[in-house]
Amino acid sequence: MIETPRLVLRPWRDTDRAPFHELNSDPRVMEFFPSIPMREQSDALIDRCQEHFERHGFTFFAAELRESGELAGFIDLAHTPFEAHFTPCVEIGWRLGFTYWNRGLATEGARAALNFGFEQLRLREIVALTVPANLRSRRVMEKLGMTIDPAGAFDHPRVPEGHPLRRHVLYRIQSPLL
């Protein structure tokens, strides 16, 4: 678990499945993804996160509000699950329900995840990726001190050819402990 003043980043629970699917069903949340997942796909993402945690000791953890215990989404680190010119690597990611936007929660949780990655996991570098138009996520990346890799743009191999969201930008941050 990783705790911040307002969040607890923790392993997933079965009780997270319904609210996570609800979050994933919101077109505003999924604006920069190729499709809105069905319940089975949303549950499968939780399953993959749990498997990643069992294998590596970290994952995209459930992000819970400390004050209320509500599931806000996910934030944390995971190995990038596809091959690209910058893999293998560990990426930082977040997805929060619309209700939780514009509160600084993504930045707060992601900053804690970066610290965990560098201090506990001893990672040398962490990456983040998104579509160029996702300015909200890009602002979070920049607030975290990540910088865009000008040569890092790539076509996401899990997005169909010709899809307008296939092209992605790559951000990087090096460990300050090096």
Image (cartoon, rainbow, N blue to C red):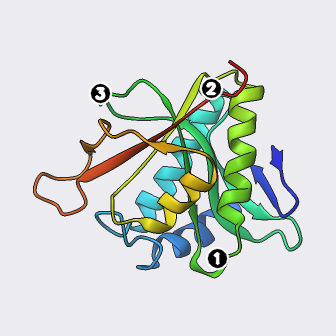
Q: Which residue occupies the foreground of this view, 167 or 36?
A: 167
Left/right of residue 64 with respect to residue 50 in the rendered view: right
**Residue 108 percent coordinates (x, y):** 74, 57
Q: Earlier in the sequence, mark 1 or mark 2?
A: 2
**Left or right, residue 111 beside residue 171:** right
Whole-percent x, y for residue 79 in the image: 50, 32
Q: Nearer the viewer, mark 3 or mark 2?
A: 3
Badges 1 and 2: C-beta atoms under 8 Å apart? no
- Mark carried by residue 85: 3
Per the image, label 2 sits on a secondary structure element best described as helix
> What secondary structure is marked by label 3?
loop
Q: Position of residue 100 (x, y in %)?
A: 66, 76
Counting residues from the start of the chain, the first of labels 3 and 1 encountered is 3
Q: How many marks?
A: 3
Residue at 32%, 37% in the rendered image: 152
Residue 154 marker: none
As drawn, which residue projects farthest toward the top?
178
Instruction: State whether residue 11 appears in this view.
Output: no
Q: Is residue 139 left or right of residue 35?
A: right
Asked whether 68 or 122 is in front, the reply is: 122
The answer to whether 114 is drawn above or below residue 167 in the figure is above
Q: Badge 3 local density, few (<14 within 10 Å), some, or many (20+)?
A: few
Residue at point 60% right, 25% down?
Answer: 55
- What is the quadrant of the N terminus in the image? top right
Residue projecting furthest to the left: 162
- Tell me the quadrant of the picture where the C terminus can be found: top right
Question: Does label 3 or label 2 sit earlier along the sequence?
Answer: 2
Q: Secondary structure at mark 1?
A: loop
Q: Give, as a three-letter code, the residue at label 2.
A: His
Which residue in the structure is indicated by mark 2?
56
Q: Residue at x 31, y 29 (%)?
A: 83
Q: CA distance from mark 3 to mark 2?
A: 22 Å
